[in-house]
Amino acid sequence: MKNFSKAGLLILTLVTPALIFVFLKFFGTNHYVLSYYNPQTDSNGQVIVENGDTLFKKNPEIKLKSSEIKLAGKITVINYLPAVCKDSCLLMLAQIQRVNNLTIDIPDLVITTLADSAYMQHSDYPDELGKQNWKILLTGKEEATDVMEKLSGSCQDDLHNMLVLVDKDGYTRGYYKGADPEDSDRLMAEIKILQYEYKNSTH
């Protein structure tokens, strides 16, 4: 009788976690929803609200002087790389390198680095920079600043050390301090959340 009880307890211990996982997978709801940023404003600077919902700026593409950034259909992370990259800039590139590793499992993820026109190859730059899903677009500092302000809003500080997350519809979904490992962890988690939402979308 004791052996039967022990066997039953063992089976219960092994089966219960599996049942919980199956329940959460098929009946659970993901309540972690990413915010939208950069609301639309009218000529008086007032946020536009329609049917009780705030309207947000949508950028399916951004035109540069010599090229364009196509944001529609991709999860995009955008940053700026100055002509001289030292200290916090190199730390930022190291964090983007971690984010870039997600492209192995999330092929819809693209990293776009706006590089200063005086950008030169540097021995400390990650090998992945400019290859596959990590693109480089040459631009000047002023133009790069305009792009980052357009995506993040002029209220943001230190635009040149910022990472901006844009969803497949061109909406800004997050800002992150490029050299901060904790912010990079948050970015990576929120990219996975976006991917999960698209994967499980009924639309």
Image (cartoon, grey):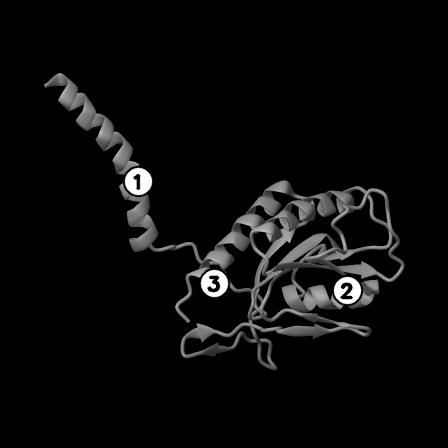
Residue positioned 77% across, 56% down in the render: 130
Compared with 136, 39 (above or below) is: below
Q: In front: mark 1 or mark 3? A: 1
Mark 3 lies on residue: 198
Mark 1 lies on residue: 18
Badge 2 density bin: few <14, some 14–19, many ≥20, Cα 10 Å: many
The label number, if any, that marks residue 144 in the structure image: 2
Nearer-the-camera pick, 37 or 58 = 58
Residue 108 in the image, given as x and y percentages of width and height: 58, 61
Compared with 54, 116 (above or below) is: above
- Sooner in the amino-acid sequence: mark 3 or mark 2: 2
Nearer-the-camera pick, 76 or 12 = 12
Q: In front: mark 3 or mark 2? A: 3
Q: CA distance from mark 3 to mark 2?
A: 29 Å
Residue 42 in the image, given as x and y percentages of width and height: 58, 80
Kind of residue at disc 3: Tyr
Residue 148's image quarter?
A: bottom right
Kind of residue at disc 1: Ala
Q: CA distance from mark 1 to mark 2?
A: 49 Å
Q: CA distance from mark 1 to mark 3?
A: 25 Å
Residue positioned 30% across, 40% down in the render: 18
Residue 110 in the image, given as x and y percentages of width and height: 65, 59
